[in-house]
Image (spheres, grey):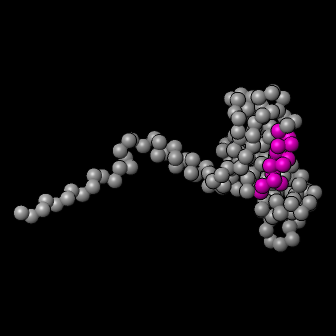
């Protein structure tokens, strides 16, 4: 994403996660001068502030949305996707994330088939990744691995 970007937890550098994660959104907002009304300094509190129109909170989500838009546009240019599903806790932020994301995607989408990409939140919410991993694991199991065995035989009736 950003070849000179911040180191990422995955071991790489400049991944979308280093720009658009909840932790980074909260850090960006506080770095811009945003201060929470209570003790909550997470992206959830930043999202609430953004909904209330706080410019520093809006800026933090705008930056995250721009990074996601650039990543989606790049991916869609390579593999021609029709829908980008955004999961993880940040997706629960709703329109404070999705509105700037869609606005920036319109800017980054130069190719006609990229302009039509739909961006939606994961229906399974923050647990979507885990559910997907479990589904893949089940697919990889041998056919009978999940069988619970044959039903117990019915004892023969007495004569
Ligand atoms: Zn990474």
Q: Quadrant of the N terminus?
A: top right
Q: Residue at x 73, y 32 (%)?
A: 76
Residue 55 position (above or below residue 77): below
Q: Residue at x 82, y 38 (%)?
A: 105
Q: Residue at x 38, y 49 (%)?
A: 146
Tell me residue 149's x, y (percent): 30, 52
Q: Is residue 86 left or right of residue 54?
A: left
Q: Quadrant of the C terminus?
A: bottom left
Q: Residue at x 92, y 60 (%)?
A: 53
Q: Is residue 60 left or right of residue 121?
A: right
**Furthest residue in direction bottom, as rendered:** 38
Tell me residue 133's x, y (percent): 55, 47
The residue segment tinted magenta is 93-105
> From where the camera sits, is residue 30 visible?
no
Tell me residue 81's x, y (percent): 69, 33
Near-viewer residue (23 or 70): 70
Tell me residue 98's x, y (percent): 80, 49
**Residue 100 belongs to magenta span:** yes
Residue 46 position (above or below residue 138): below
């Amino acid at each position: 994403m950003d070849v000179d970007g911040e180191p990422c937890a995955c071991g790489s550098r400049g991944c979308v996660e280093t720009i658009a994660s909840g932790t980074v959104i909260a850090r960006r907002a506080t770095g811009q001068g945003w201060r929470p009304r209570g003790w909550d300094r997470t992206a959830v509190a930043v999202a609430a502030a953004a909904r209330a129109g706080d410019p520093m909170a809006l800026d933090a989500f705008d930056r995250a949305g721009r990074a996601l838009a650039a990543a989606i546009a790049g991916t869609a240019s390579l593999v021609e996707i029709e829908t980008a599903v955004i999961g993880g806790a940040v997706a629960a932020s709703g329109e404070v994330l999705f509105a700037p994301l869609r606005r920036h995607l319109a800017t980054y989408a130069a190719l006609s088939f990229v302009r039509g990409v739909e961006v939606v939140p994961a229906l399974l919410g923050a647990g979507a990744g885990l559910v997907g991993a479990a589904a893949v694991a089940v697919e990889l199991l041998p056919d009978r691995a999940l069988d619970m065995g044959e039903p117990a035989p019915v004892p023969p009736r007495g004569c």
